[in-house]
Amino acid sequence: MYGSKVIISTVLRWRFFMRLEESEIEAPRLGEPFLLTPGPLTTSYDTKSAMLKDWGSWDGDFRQMTQLMRDQLIEMLGSGNESFDCVPMQGSGSFSVEAMLGSFVPKDGKVLVLSNGAYGQRAAKTLKYLKRDHIVLDKGDYLPPRGEEVAEILETDNDITHVVAVHCETSSGILNPIEEISVATYNAGRKLLIDSMSAFGAILVEPNKIKFEAIVSSANKCIEGVPGFGFILARKSALEAAEGNSHSLCLDLHDQWSHMNKTGQWRYTPPTHVLAAFLVALESHRKEGGVIGRGARYTKNQNALVSGMRSIGFETLLGERWLSPIIVTFFCPADPSFEFTKFYDLMKSKGFIIYPGKLTVVESFRIGCIGQMDDQIMLKVVDAARESLREMGVTDASPPSKALEERKRLQS
Ligand SMILES: Cc1ncc(COP(=O)(O)O)c(C=O)c1O
């Protein structure tokens, strides 16, 4: 019995890897599963290999590497980038979000947080810790905060100094309408801070087209580096004005920025190997055609995934207008034979790690479109999902009616 299981799984893997030859992207060389997650994600072998060398953090070579990264990230912003500077910050993305909020919102400032998922909620929680006055426009699990709602709140509350928006709310995959939010914010004379953790590098946010003070992302998202630091791209005027605002020494962006500009060094131990890997990832990003090229591959991934999953009966939480090329939420099937943990294990055995959903009303799961994958690989993901349903005895992948009623709220 056990022997036949091994043979079946070997044959499946063999079949899987044979078919991967059609893809232009190499499967993980050490045989680990693809990470269909919002990051850390599957990185290239070259990116990982760049970490085999040690770097002295004070040495001129490493200082040059830091400067190169900062310059390339500013360039990636596109038109209007000359007013911006880049400040990297050690830690995961949340450390950089906290650094941005604590450094740009003065102690007597007030923030309007636009929340439609876990990362909006985390921004509000961070402000609570930082003891910064704030109010939350809470749109629930995924409904988008709209420009007119922002305008209305700003008109009635003159104390609000800053608006915080999440670009792609990774917990549902919705691409929030950042342009109309920016227009409403600056029409009311306030300032916008953007958490573009999961979208920066794949979706353009040019300062000449969308006005904002600062935007934050991290190494292990659309630029396809490994985890270890985040970065904030901010107006130089905002960085200058940030002196003395921060609640925290380590997360003080003004201090990190002025020290880096004076010495070329990070203030405290930098993630040397992570930066070396990130430079290789940046070079691949440039060769792929920058933000446009990277975004085009992810969009092809999303289209292959969504149409394939729909063809086997799955339904997406979001309609086309709100889907992002970053990550897609699917409803779990109503079929009583479907169990997410079993589905997860079966998908993993076929070479794919997927992600649980974060909706509170109905059960869901998520599949990421970012990382070292192309549309051919996404077709294998769909094959794996079809096969996993068959192995579980699920004959119908359609969601419960409650899920479809929930989805109607977005269309109304
Ligand atoms: C939009 C958004 N903000 C913040 C974060 C937090 O980043 P981290 O988990 O690296 O702390 C994430 C992580 O996926 C994210 O997607």
Image (tube, rainbow, N blue to C red):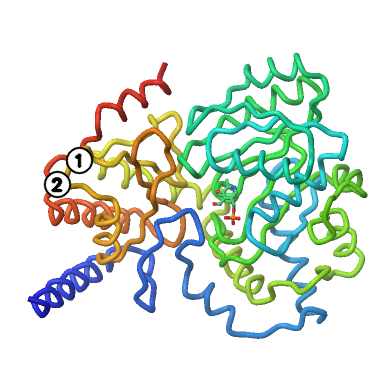
**Quick check: 111 above or below 204?**
above
Considering the numbered disc 1 on the image, is that residue within a helix, a strand or a loop?
Answer: loop
Query: Which residue is disc 1 drawn over?
Result: 397
Q: CA distance from mark 1 to mark 2?
A: 7 Å
The answer to whether 242 appears left or right of 160 in the picture is right
Determine the residue positioned at 55% across, 56% down: 221
**Place of residue 197 in the rendered image (x, y in percent of width and height, measured from the top left):** 60, 49
Q: Amino acid at mark 1?
A: Ala
- Mark 2 lies on residue: 394
Say whether mark 1 is within 8 Å of ligand 1. no
Front residue of 29 and 76: 29
Residue 183 in the image, given as x and y percentages of width and height:
69, 24
Query: Going by the image, does 256 lie left or right of 1?
Result: right
Q: Quadrant of residue 329?
A: top left
Q: Tell me the quarter of the picture where residue 19 sits.
A: bottom left
Q: Which amino acid does the dot numbered 2 rest on?
A: Val
